Image (cartoon, helix red, strand yellow):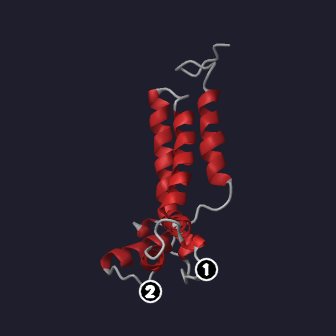
Amino acid sequence: MSGYFDSTSVIHSKLTDFAIFIQMPEFTTTTEAGGRAERYPILFKAFVPKPHLGTASSSETYNIGGGGHLFWMNRLTQWGILGFSAFIYMLYTVYKKIHSLFDNEFGYYYSLSILAFVMLGLVKNIAGREPYLMLLIIIPGLYFTQFGVDKKGNSTI
């Protein structure tokens, strides 16, 4: 697929890198994808000694390297099962409340956006407020902008 893009583009290099990782799945920094995958075992080793309260509750320092780039696993490692569960519960409560405002069709697409958010957090750090603004304000706002418009796009106001 990378052949469809300009050979100097970032997309071309990312797809080529991932193809190499699929052909030779090594958890090393020989490929960017392998370098990201390499961080999971490092975070898991730091998680195992303090699974309930996480590494943030420990006076020991754990070398987690670039583990901060994996959002969900980093949060689990730092906060432990109890802190991470509270965080997930808060996110779920907000998601459930917002989802209840939508009809089934738009709710399906909102659920897909939540899934994309979760999947992104498995391989990247979800930094800043922008992803949360998208899920809490912009995407729900798109739903409410369609009121006053019929299925053909004509104004009913």
Near-viewer residue (151 or 56)? 56
* Position in image of residue 11 (x %, y %): 51, 68
Vertical side of 33 occupied by 155: above or below: above
- Where is residue 64 drawn, in percent x and y? 54, 80
Residue at disc 2, secondary structure = loop
Query: Residue 139 versus residue 48: which sits nearer the camera?
Result: 48
- Residue 59: give its label: 1
Q: Residue furthest left?
A: 23
At 59% from the left edge and 44% from the top edge, which residue is drawn? Answer: 135
Left or right of 24 in this view: 42: right
Give x and y (percent) for residue 119.
Answer: 46, 57
**Residue found at x 48% / y 65%:** 52
Tell me what residue is drawn at x 53 percent, y 20 percent. 152
Residue found at the very far top of the displayed protein: 157
Is 77 left, or right, of 136 in this rendering?
Answer: left
Q: Quadrant of residue 148?
A: top right
Image quarter of the N terminus: bottom left
The mark that comes first in sequence, 2 or 1, is 2
Please give the residue where the numbered disc 2 appears in the rendered image: 30
Could you tell me the amino acid type at mark 1?
A: Ser
Q: Quadrant of the C terminus?
A: top right
Mark 2: few, some, or many residues within 10 Å (few <14, many ≥20)? few
Q: Pointers 2 and 1 in contact (CB under 8 A)? A: no
Q: CA distance from mark 2 to mark 1?
A: 34 Å
* Total number of numbered discs in the rendering: 2
Q: Amino acid at mark 2?
A: Thr
Of residues 78 and 149, the one drawn nearer to the viewer in this rendering: 78
Q: Can I make out residue 62 in this image?
A: yes
Give the vertical position of 150 relative to 55 (above or below).
above
